[in-house]
Amino acid sequence: MNQPLISLNNVTYTYPSARQPALRNLSLDVEAGEFLLVTGVSGAGKSTLLRLFNGLVPHFYGGHVSGSVRVAGRDPVALGPGEMSDIVGLVFQDPEAQFVAEIVEDELAFALENAGLPMPLMRKRVEESLHALSIEHLRGRRVSTLSGGERQRVAIAAVLTLQPQVLVLDEPTSQLDPQSAEEVLDALVKLNSDLGLTIILSEHRLERVVQYADRILYIEMDGETQLGTPRDILSSTALAPPVTEVGKLLNWTPLPLTIKEGRRFVQERALFNLHSKDPSPAFDPSPEAASLDRAWFSYDGREVLRGLSMSIRQGEITALMGRNGAGKTTILKLIVGLLKPGRGSVCTLDEDTRNISLDALSRLVGYVPQQPDVLLFADTVQAEIDFTRRTHGLPPDGAQLMQTLGLTPYRMADPRDLSVGERQRVAIAAVLAGDPPLLVLDEPTRGLDYLQKTALTHMLRTLRDNGKTVILATHDVELAARLADRVVLLGDGEVIADGPAREVMTGSLVFSSQVSKLFRDPALITVEDVENALAANE
């Protein structure tokens, strides 16, 4: 009988100064050539597990490990990342965190130079990695000019040059638009099927990846785990993609994992009678909360916005969507005053952003950027919230806010010790603590599981119902379907479509939800819509 490529036996790991272990008595075998999906609630230890495979845990992070870990016969706990790099390639959530060179080809050659490989072999390895990820055309490009999807593929290619047996990826699609995510996942599937590369991937957006996995490792917050086929795991856990949730609602067997599988049930059982009246909102005459009037903006001579005009109405939730590089983040930064238009004008809450100080505007607008760490500086979560309230002249509080965002257990924790999803929630809480009339969020669901996204959705709806305005840039199609009143679809620095969320998303091939693709009806774009249609037809 063949030995598993990876074997963990009763592994427990605790970070320095942590009160509870991040991993508890975890046992796991992974076969060579397997595609393993690691999922579970945010903060359950998924990223910690991935770092264990190449020895980053405990060599970089410290702490204590008990139990045994073997990867291709080696002990990463004893050897560390340097001795494991030829066996395990690790790609972080943010690929920029591991880039060291300016030019793509130099980035791919860097690890090989450090390994002292001869030049002919280096050239061969670089060429093979460029070809494997279909990025030959990027070899001479500066990393800083690449899109999100291109950067992710370059990061994967860079670790492939060492020809590892295992490729480990931590939420590789979390910052990618649907099409870029599909390109990256297609590349991983090809590496897995054609080259036999073992893939271990952590991901919250299961709708993007579950169909590719051989097995799922599901980690609970208390450390308990479930391991099995995707269908078995998703049928018994609270976290599942929308098409699977619809299957559970309608008792479809076998439980669908993909739109193709779900469409068979829709066609065979004439379920289009679930149609209900399209609840798209009528035109909203509310005053403007923010507007761009023929705004232009360039980075180092590269035009990002080209005379773009749009307006955001008060008391609505607007989602900016589009491919990586379409201009979403630039628009948010213009609205909050971090950037000024080269031509045209930007008005936020009746203030021309060129004529108001950033400090004054920041008291009116709450802004959470893609990288929430830039907002976090206090020693505890409670202190972050207290600081915001104090600077806005509000009494120290925040208990309800922390409870809503699931942060109460971390009230006295240092934000820097939390997971990416937990830090994201702390940053949102710190901004909301100031009670701003306008809330601007850039990719707010990065690192959040389905349950936390549901809690965030309810909270933002409540803010809107209380008169607040919310603007978010997102690649999370499912979030936009559930949350947005209006969607502005951007492309190449211009507005491609602008209207009610149901109308815009139903008419898009790429930016449409799983439920929308399943039923092809503007009245049915979320699992909640299906639940409501079922109740109405009873």
Image (cartoon, grey):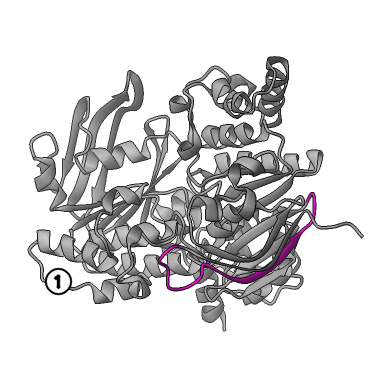
- Secondary structure category for the residue under label 1: loop
Q: Identity of the amino acid at label 1?
A: Pro
The local crowd at label 1, few if under 14, some if 14 to 19, many if 20 or more residues have their Cα within 10 Å, is some
Q: Nearer the viewer, residue 82 or 93?
A: 82
Dot 1 corresponds to which residue? Answer: 396
Question: Is residue 28 highlighted in magenta?
Answer: yes
Location of the N terminus by quadrant is bottom right
Seen as rendered, the residue at the extreme right is: 1
Q: Looking at the picture, does residue 14 appear above or below residue 35?
A: below
- Residue 175 appears at what percent x and percent y? 48, 45
Q: Which residue is drawn at the image coordinates 23% and 62% (left, top)?
A: 384
In terms of depth relative to the viewer, which is nearer, 287 or 513? 513
Question: Does residue 111 show up?
Answer: yes
Look at the image and give the residue range highlighted in magenta.
16-33
In which quadrant is the C terminus drawn?
Answer: bottom right
The residue at 64%/74% (across/down) is: 248
Q: Can you tell which quarter of the image residue 17 is in?
A: bottom left
Residue 240 in the magenta stretch? The answer is: no
